[in-house]
Every structure is written in structure tokens, then in C-alpha cells.
Amino acid sequence: MNIDLYSRRVDYLRIAVTTRCNLACSFCAPKNYDCCQGLDEELTDDEIISIASAAASVGFKKIRLTGGEPLLRRGIDSLAAQISNIHGIEELTLTTNGSLLENKARTLFAAGIKRININLPSIDPVRYKKITGKDELENVLKGIAAAKLAGIGIKINVVALAHLCEDDVVALAHFAEGHSIKIRFIEYMPLGVDPLVESLSIDTLRGWIKKHRLKAEIIAAMNAPFCKSCNRLRISASGEVFPCLFGSPSHYLAGSLNNDPKQIENILLEAVRCKPAGYADAYTCESYRPLIRNIGG
Ligand code: SAM
């Protein structure tokens, strides 16, 4: 059963399909990150499909493809199409930085991806470049337009860093509202990156949203954790299984399993049983902290 020790039904799998990324966001990438370099061996398409099929067999209903930057993976659209055809998978989504989306939006929609989350840390070109290390804002905006045109539902993710100012928050929320797109400000999680990066105070953010009557959601993963309703397992690009974003991997799913469905199902169910009650438990027990870039947030 995909019910864990705390009675949570775990039916949402996030699969990182690559560790490579074409951006080096300050909240995600380590300092001096070489954005073209993959860190580990990546799971093959066959392995990912075996994992997704096994997950569906044990009750997982939703899969999100993430990374790294998932649109850098060659053949991502055909991989997505195969996953969305798996019996039992009701929803396939994707998280992207949007910079490569313009030319892929239509094929992704045809492949079954009806909703995507787009990481948009600023809509000011200079600040965007400062945060991401790249001059890609225009391409991201084109990607957003193309995804809308293709019929894909979009949510914008903004990691709320300390240097985000009131004007940035207002501009981002107005941009989203003007395009009828939902926007969420996500509290910064200290997952193994630059120790100098800090989160914006959630109270400050809340104050600005109220003051300007902005239509925006806040995801305060650290201040108001939603562990009690966490329904996720995560698979890294190299096949590690993470019961909690803040803990170490409980299992490893790759070549040696020979894509044996039963063995993969058992591992997924064991990982469900390893889910800690809350992230604080995973945090304190572990010396190894994963990089969010390897497991996809
Ligand atoms: N390349 C894609 C992207 O940029 O969205 C997918 C990978 S990225 C790791 C997935 C999401 O994780 C990002 O959209 C961002 O919202 C979130 N994220 C990354 N680092 C984070 C951090 N330190 N704290 C909170 N959220 C973070």
C-alpha cells in the first residue's frame, strides 16, 4: 500500500530527468557551477518508464518531471508521451526555467503535459541576470506566451530571496495577473547551496501582498511546513529515491534492477514507509544533504 506510517497517501512522484541546467540560479546552484556539466549518470528513458509504470502499479497517480532543467534532456517530449500513456497516471506535469520552452510548448502539450510550473525569479532583465547568471528573460517570456498559446496551464514560481524588494514582488504579481497566470512566492529552502543566500521574511512578503492587494500565494515550506499532508516521493536523475526533500536517499533505482517491475514496486513502497513525519526529522538525522538541483525541488 502506498500509505505511509503517518497515514499519508503517497501518490505523487517527482522525477529529475537530468542534473544539467542552463541557468545557475543563486538559490539553487552551488557557487562556480558549471551549468553544462551533469554530475551523475542519468537514468535512461527505459529506466524512467519502468519506474513510472511501477509507481502507477502501486497507486501513484501524479508525476512531475523536473531537474536540473528537464527541457535539456534529449527526447523529453517522447519520454513524456510514454509516461502519460501509462495506465493509472492521471496527471503529468513539469517544472522548468522556461528558457527553452518556446519551441517545445506544443509538442509537450501533445505529449500529455497539460500544466507546468515556471521558475521566474524576476521580470527585470538586469535582476533576472543577476539571480540566474544568464540573459534569458526574453526567452522565458516567449516560452510563457508559447505555453499559453499551446493550452498549457501555467504557474509561476518565485523563490523569495532576501534581496527581492517590494517593487519586484509587485511587478511579478502584476505580470502574472495581467496574463491570468497563478503566481507563488516560495520560501527559500537552505538545501546545500551558497550559505550567504537568505530568504525574504515571510511576514514582510505577506505585508506587501496585503498592502498592494496582490493575487499571489505564499509557500512557506520552512515557516509553515506542509509535511502532514506531504504525498511525495522524489527520484534523482541518477535513480536515488528520496522519501523527504531534506533527507538522504533511502534506496537506489538503476541498472542493477534490470527494470524488474516487482523489485521496483517493492523499493517504492519501502521508500514510502521510510517517509519521516516531518522534514525536521529528516534534517536532524542526516549528515548528507541533497542539492535541490539534483532532485528537482
Ligand atoms: N530547472 C527547473 C526550474 O528552474 O524550475 C526545474 C528544477 S528547479 C530545482 C525546481 C524548482 O525548485 C524551481 O522552480 C524553484 O521554484 C525551486 N527551488 C530551487 N531552489 C530552491 C530553494 N533553495 N528553495 C526553494 N525553492 C527552490
Image (cartoon, rainbow, N blue to C red):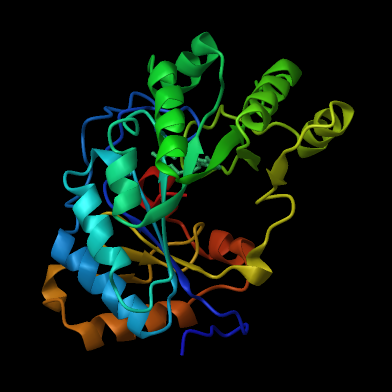
Q: Is residue 19 visible?
A: no
Occupied quadrant, residue 248: bottom left
Measured from the top left, where is residue 216 in percent x and y? 72, 38
Measured from the top left, where is residue 166 in percent x and y? 75, 20
Left or right: 175, with 45 as reference point: right
Measured from the top left, where is residue 145 in percent x and y? 45, 29
* Residue name at image x 45 percent, y 46 percent: 152
* Residue name at image x 74 percent, y 54 percent: 224
Farthest right residue? Answer: 211
Query: Which residue occupies the foreground of this view, 131 or 176?
Result: 176
Left or right: 217, with 50 as reference point: right
Query: Which residue occupies the foreground of this view, 273 or 261?
Result: 261
* Residue name at image x 65 percent, y 20 percent: 163
The tally of labels here is: 0
Left or right: 91, with 206 as reference point: left
Query: Which residue occupies the foreground of this view, 293 or 15?
Result: 15
* Residue name at image x 46 percent, y 79 percent: 272
Q: Is residue 230 visible?
A: yes
Residue 86 position (above or below residue 65): below
Query: Which residue occupies the foreground of this view, 218 or 234?
Result: 218
Measured from the top left, where is residue 278 in percent x and y? 63, 67
Residue 150 position (above or below residue 6): above
